[in-house]
């Protein structure tokens, strides 16, 4: 490390963010840690000179992207006082699939907005956020995505639906935990193919919600929730209001009983997902007969919290 350079608490927090998020743009890091983009750029340049981070360009992405280097990961491990291998760290390389990377960054945007919104809301705690890329090794050394799940496919006897969300997170308000699954739809997935894409995800979550063995309770320990989850919500973030309405129209064709299960799947557009609005009444349910606007956290503290997550209706 260069002489006369002292890492600040903000530097260490930035390195920890890169460990958690894997890849972040300069703007995303600025939103998390810096008052201005100029300050962020200057400090990131110094951290790169210290061999703690690396930056790169990707097709279709306007700004430089930042990732943690091995030296930076070891510093984070020392700061957290845990062995490096417990942090799911592996040496990062520039991703080759840039469509995946753009999807990855969109998930990061949601997580940043959620994190900042929770900081602004007294009494609301983000218990944790598990991204899609987190995996665990089995006895054969193969890596399985931790949040991948399987349900029986009622439409085809003996078949199963396997799905991995983009993320799973939990909030706690006034001692009550609520569980959420996140799906980022960038408009590239087909809508009317029941075997893949958006419609497959709808089918998976509706069966997952109604499963008798409540498989989603496995996340109680992961998030340290003090109570069992009373259901969950699925949040779909899509590209436009038109695509959102097309998704709702397709959802109405699914033969699921009870039909009210569709009201646990919520949709909104990417432009509504910022730190000011993300918790508010910007969400519509998959049920096209449902004219309510939903919010992750009620604006009025006198409003009643529902059994299956936080919601408020118009």
Image: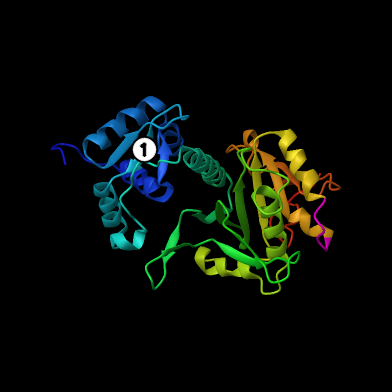
Figure quadrant of the N terminus: top left
Q: Secondary structure at mark 1?
A: strand
Q: Which corner quadrant of the image does residue 275 belong to? A: top right
Residue at (71% x, 49% y) in the render: 193
User: What x and y, as percent, mark residue 172?
Assistant: 59, 58
* Residue 38 horizontal side relative to residue 189, left or right: left
Q: Residues within 10 Å of mark 1 (few under 14, many from 20)?
A: many
Judging depth in this view, the residue of 239 and 313 nearest the camera is: 239
Residue 250 visible in the snapshot: yes
Magenta stretch, main secondary structure class: loop
User: What x and y, as percent, mark residue 199?
Assistant: 71, 50
Q: Is residue 153 magenta?
A: no
Q: Is residue 257 magenta?
A: yes
Residue 81 visible in the snapshot: no
Residue at (51% x, 53% y) in the render: 132
Asked if 314 appears above or below 203 in the picture, the reply is: above
Residue sitting farthest toward the right: 289
Residue at (77% x, 39% y) in the render: 245
User: What x and y, as percent, mark residue 310?
Assistant: 69, 54
Residue sitting farthest toward the left: 3
* Residue 85 horizontal side relative to residue 204, left or right: left
Residue where numbered disc 1 is placed: 66
Colour mapping used in the image: rainbow
Q: Which corner quadrant of the image does residue 282 belong to? A: top right
Asked if 63 appears above or below 150 in the picture, the reply is: above
Figure quadrant of the C terminus: top right
Asked if 223 appears above or below 124 in the picture, the reply is: below
Residue stretch rendered in magenta on the structure: 253-258
User: What x and y, as percent, mark residue 148?
Assistant: 55, 61
Number of callouts = 1
């Amino acid at each position: 490390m260069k002489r006369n350079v002292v890492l600040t608490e903000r530097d260490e927090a930035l390195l920890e963010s890169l460990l958690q998020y894997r890849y972040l743009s300069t703007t995303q890091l600025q939103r998390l840690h810096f008052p201005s983009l100029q300050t962020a750029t200057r400090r990131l340049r110094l951290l790169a000179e210290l061999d703690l981070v690396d930056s790169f360009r990707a097709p279709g992405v306007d700004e430089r992207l930042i990732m943690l280097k091995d030296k930076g990961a070891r510093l984070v491990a020392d700061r957290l006082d845990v062995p490096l291998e417990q942090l799911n760290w592996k040496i990062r390389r520039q991703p080759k699939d840039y469509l995946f990377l753009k999807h990855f960054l969109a998930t990061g945007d949601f997580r940043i907005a959620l994190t900042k919104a929770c900081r602004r809301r007294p009494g609301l705690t983000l218990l944790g956020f598990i991204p899609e890329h987190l995996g665990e090794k089995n006895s054969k050394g193969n890596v399985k995505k931790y949040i991948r799940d399987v349900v029986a496919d009622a439409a085809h006897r003996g078949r199963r639906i396997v799905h991995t969300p983009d993320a799973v997170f939990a909030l706690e308000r006034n001692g009550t935990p609520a569980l959420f699954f996140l799906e980022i739809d960038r408009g590239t997935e087909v809508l009317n193919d029941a075997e893949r894409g958006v419609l497959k995800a709808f089918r998976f979550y509706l069966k997952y919600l109604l499963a008798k063995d409540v498989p989603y309770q496995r996340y109680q320990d992961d998030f340290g929730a003090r109570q069992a989850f009373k259901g969950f919500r699925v949040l779909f973030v899509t590209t436009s209001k038109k695509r959102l309405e097309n998704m709702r129209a397709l959802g109405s064709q699914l033969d699921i009983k009870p039909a009210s299960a569709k009201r646990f799947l919520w949709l909104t557009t990417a432009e509504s997902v910022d730190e000011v609005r993300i918790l508010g009444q910007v969400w519509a349910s998959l049920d096209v007969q449902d004219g309510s606007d939903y919010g992750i956290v009620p604006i009025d503290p006198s409003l009643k919290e529902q059994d299956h997550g936080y919601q408020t209706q118009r």
